[in-house]
Each structure stands twice: as C-alpha cells, then as structure tokens.
Image: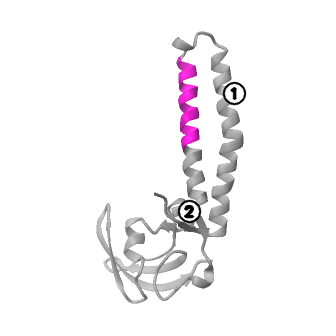
Amino acid sequence: MSTVSYYTAEGLQRLKDELHELRTKGRAAAAAAIAEARDKGDLSENAEYDAAKDAQGLLEMKISKLEEVVGNARVLDESSIDISKAGLLTTVTFKDTKSGAVQAFTLVSEEEADLKLRKISIKSPIGQALVGKAIGELAKAQTPAGVKEFEIVDIALAI
C-alpha cells in the first residue's frame, strides 16, 4: 500500500525529470545493450546478454517505483505549514546541548534529502527527533555517535 508524500514544487519536478530520463534515454540504452549482446551469438552462453537483461529488469523496477512515488506525491501548500513546531519544509535551528554547536537544517521528504544543501529527511534519526518540537524544547536523537540532545532555537518556513 502506498502513502502520500509531500514535496516542494522543485523536489517533485526533479523526480518527474528523473522519471522522464529513465523512460526515454534509460530504456533506449538498455535496448541498445541487449541488441548489441544479442548480435554476439548464442544466447544460451552469452553472459553479456544475461547482464543486459538483468540491467533492463533493474531499470524497469526503478521506473515502476518512481512512477508510484510521483503518482502519490503532493506539493505542500506553504500556507498550511505550521511553524510553531518543527515539521516538513521547516528550517529548524538547534543547539547541541553538550557541545554548544548550532546548526540549521530543513526537514524534507526522504527523496529530497541532501546534506550538502542542509536538507535532512523527516525519517532520519535527527529529523524524527525534531518533528513536533517547538522553540525551547529539547529533542533527543540516537546517532552513530550515541544519543545527542538538541535544544530548538528557531523554526522558520523553508519555502
């Protein structure tokens, strides 16, 4: 059973562009690889042909999954975002209670997460700890380095 996921307009467009790319160029490249391998002779002992067919199967699986994600995707209306608490498409500034380090991340869907752009998934350990918290509240997250405790300093609209 699939669930609705919320995205920024930009994030949804990236998914649609990727899907289009896979459907057109990806399928054409897979077909060309199969045709090339088929031209090399006996298919019963042709490892290149088997590999090309496997790659095509993986491509079709990825296309199918992406079609499902795009089909269930909704663009989040910024007027419906409550910035009194951390949630999807809010930028949360928080302070590590132990080290005092202050960081800010935007909470996004899994597919839009990108640490370089300071976007973390709401399903990540830190994202889950922040969701639903208000300014001044403490959030605890289980990280690879152990349990981290953060104080929410600010919450702003990310859009």
Where is residue 51, by image quadrant?
A: top right
Residue 23 position (above or below residue 112): above
Q: Nearer the viewer, residue 102 or 55?
A: 55
Q: Residue at x 48, y 86 (%)?
A: 154
Q: Amino acid at mark 1?
A: Ala
Q: How would you rate the neighbour count of disc 2 (Cα within 10 Å): few for under 14, some for 14-19, many for 20 or more?
A: some
* Residue visible at 42% across and 87% down in the picture: 134
- Foreground: 98 or 117? 117
Residue at horizontal 60 percent and vertical 68 percent from the top:
74
Q: Is residue 150 left or right of residue 54?
A: left
Picture quarter containing residue 80? bottom right
Mark 2: which amino acid? Glu
In percent of width and height, residue 77 lies at 62, 78
Q: Quadrant of the image for the C terminus?
A: bottom right
Provide the secondary structure element on which disc 1 rests. helix
* Residue 79 rendering spot, x and y as whole percentages: 62, 84
| Disc marking residue 112 | 2
Tell me where residue 78 appears, x and y as whole percent: 62, 80
Find the residue positioned furthest to the top: 42
Give the magenta part as a residue range.
47-61
Q: Position of residue 3 (x, y in %)?
A: 49, 63
- The front one of 63 and 103 is 63
Q: Is residue 140 left or right of residue 159?
A: left
Instruction: Mark 1: give few (<14), some (14-19) or many (20+) Cα within 10 Å.
Output: few
Residue under pointer 1: 32
Q: Residue at x 64, y 32 (%)?
A: 30
